[in-house]
Image (cartoon, rainbow, N blue to C red):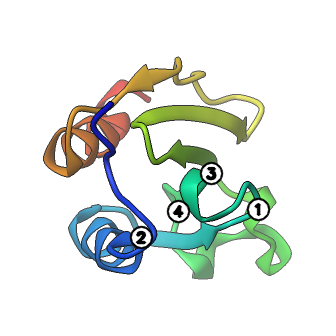
Amino acid sequence: MEKLFTFENADDFRQKLVSKLNFPYVSCQISTLGGKENISILLCISLDSKENWYNGIKENSSYYHFHISNTGIVKNFSKQYNLKHIRKFKSKNINHLIKKLNNIKEGV
């Protein structure tokens, strides 16, 4: 099975993802909780800039949290209550992933 990213290139993947996403706030961390062979990325995006967060709390903004596995499966596991749920999908490559995530703004 083709991996979207590996332990060796996960940081480069993360940096490219952060630089290409068009949101006021993007936070991205690498998780090795399942071991190096099951490395994943945790992504948080907010549709609001930090200055507009009520009481400066990210969860008071229009936010999404995603889990991106190294096999390309992307799951939306948390969001603001009134935003549209993003269904689980499989990404073929980083460009497909970036395009799909950047289209979230249009669907809200």
Circles 3 and 4: CB atoms closer than 8 Å: yes
Q: Is residue 42 above or below residue 24?
A: above
Which quadrant: the N terminus?
Answer: top left
Instruction: Name the residue at the left extreme.
Output: 95
Instruction: Name the residue at the top extreme.
Output: 87
Residue at 70% in and 28% down: 82
Residue 48's label in the rendered image is 4
Q: Tell me which numbered mark, 4 or 2, is placed earlier along the sequence.
A: 2
Residue 63's label in the rendered image is 3
Residue on which the image places disc 1: 33
Q: CA distance from mark 4 to mark 1?
A: 30 Å
Task: Please say whether residue 40 is visible from this viewpoint.
Answer: no
Residue type (three-letter) at the residue carrying disc 2 = Pro
Q: Position of residue 56 (x, y in %)?
A: 78, 80
Q: Between tags 3 and 4, which lies in front?
A: 3
Task: Please say whether residue 100 is visible from this viewpoint.
Answer: yes
Q: Secondary structure at mark 2?
A: loop
Q: Between tags 1 and 3, which lies in front?
A: 1
Residue on which the image places disc 2: 24
Q: Secondary structure at mark 1?
A: loop
Q: CA distance from mark 4 to mark 2?
A: 6 Å
Residue 21's label in the rendered image is none
